[in-house]
Amino acid sequence: MRKLQLISHDLGVDLGTSNVLIYKADSGITTREPSVVAMDKNTGKVLQVGAAARNMLGRTPGNVVAMHPLQDGVIADHDMTVSMLQKFFRDAGDSSLFAPKPRVVISVPSGVTQMDERAVINAAIEAGARRVYLIEEPLAAALGAGLDISSPKGHLVVDIGGGTTDIAVLTMNGVANSSSIKLAGNHFDETIARYVRATSRVIIGPATAEDIKIQIGGVLDRNEELSMVVKGRDAKSGMPRDITITAKEICAVLQKSALRIADEVLSVLEETSPELVGDIADTGIVLTGGGSQLWGMDVLLQNRIGIPCTVADDPASCVAYGCGKSLAWITRMNEGPINLARKKLMRE
């Protein structure tokens, strides 16, 4: 009976800047919601969480604010993060009054500080977790992508999320070398919004910029001409205005950011042992995260780095699946901060 309870209530959490995915043991991914909270500023009351709150972005009255409580992969607003996790834990867990609090495995970017790790742990405990274990996002992504990282053979994972891109060389169930940069899906959206305002004098919101990225965005020229009519606000008159954006324009804007990711991958490889680099030349580079689905991203990285790149199946869910797989050995995991940066310094 005790074993059944542990299996039923343990949760794996992909705590992303843009979305939160929760994997429940024996049930799979049960929660997939935007990491957005809407709050009444006058009373401090949380009004909506997740998709309902995202629909309020840019549309709220003066007394209501809709916000992302996580920025660049770390917690920016503690109280809002706690409220968000409380809602998601209730939705994913057992609603029974006598159900035990869940043990939770949460993913964090590989470059976070010990203070950031503590913030995640404290927020999860306040939200209702019994115990909290942390796992690096690229390690979870590799597990979710189905890579065999238990052997000495090296693998390279590039996880392009909403707030950060995590790059890691993995071997023997650990991280041999890694890097985390604050350049990912949200940065692409912001770049598109800035371009539209600079060239057309039209202001668009984050949701519209993301829609442009999904519909016609890419980092390589397409063989077909694609365009999209975009609605925004004229920066000078304040009146509504429609403009047409082409895929070629967006490609030129996004390609610079994609090349910066490729250069960071090259930097990680330069600091990796020759033996592991030789393995990676054979095993290739695996792309995960929602940002990896941007048209042409795998081809651009492959051309720039010279190593075959493939996009994992269901890349946006890989970290959540990896957190879920790690629940199988949760009793052997260490509680508290992992502080990967400190561990790397100790090894040097």
Image: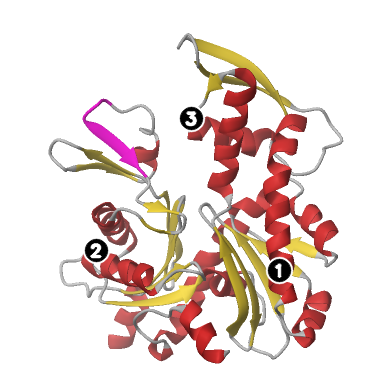
Vertical position of residue 79 compared to residue 148: above or below: above
Q: Quadrant for the N terminus, please.
A: bottom left
Closer to us: mark 2 or mark 3? 3
Q: Is residue 65 magenta?
A: yes
Q: Quadrant of residue 255?
A: top right
Residue 339 at least partly seen: yes
Q: Quadrant of residue 210?
A: top right
Q: Earlier in the sequence, mark 2 or mark 3?
A: 2
Quadrant in the picture for the C terminus: bottom right
Marks 2 and 3, Cα distance to the nearest angstrom?
31 Å
Q: Amino acid at mark 1?
A: Ser
> Which numbered mark, 1 or 3, is in the foreground of this view?
1
Q: Is residue 174 above or below residue 138?
A: below
Label 1 vs 2, first from the N-terminus: 2
Please state the extent of the stretch shown in magenta in the rendering: 61-67
Image quarter of residue 67: top left
| Residue annotated with mark 1 | 267
Tell me the distance, in whole angstroms, between the alpha carbons under discs 1 and 2.
38 Å
Q: Which mark is residue 127?
A: 2
| 46 sits to left or right of 137 | left
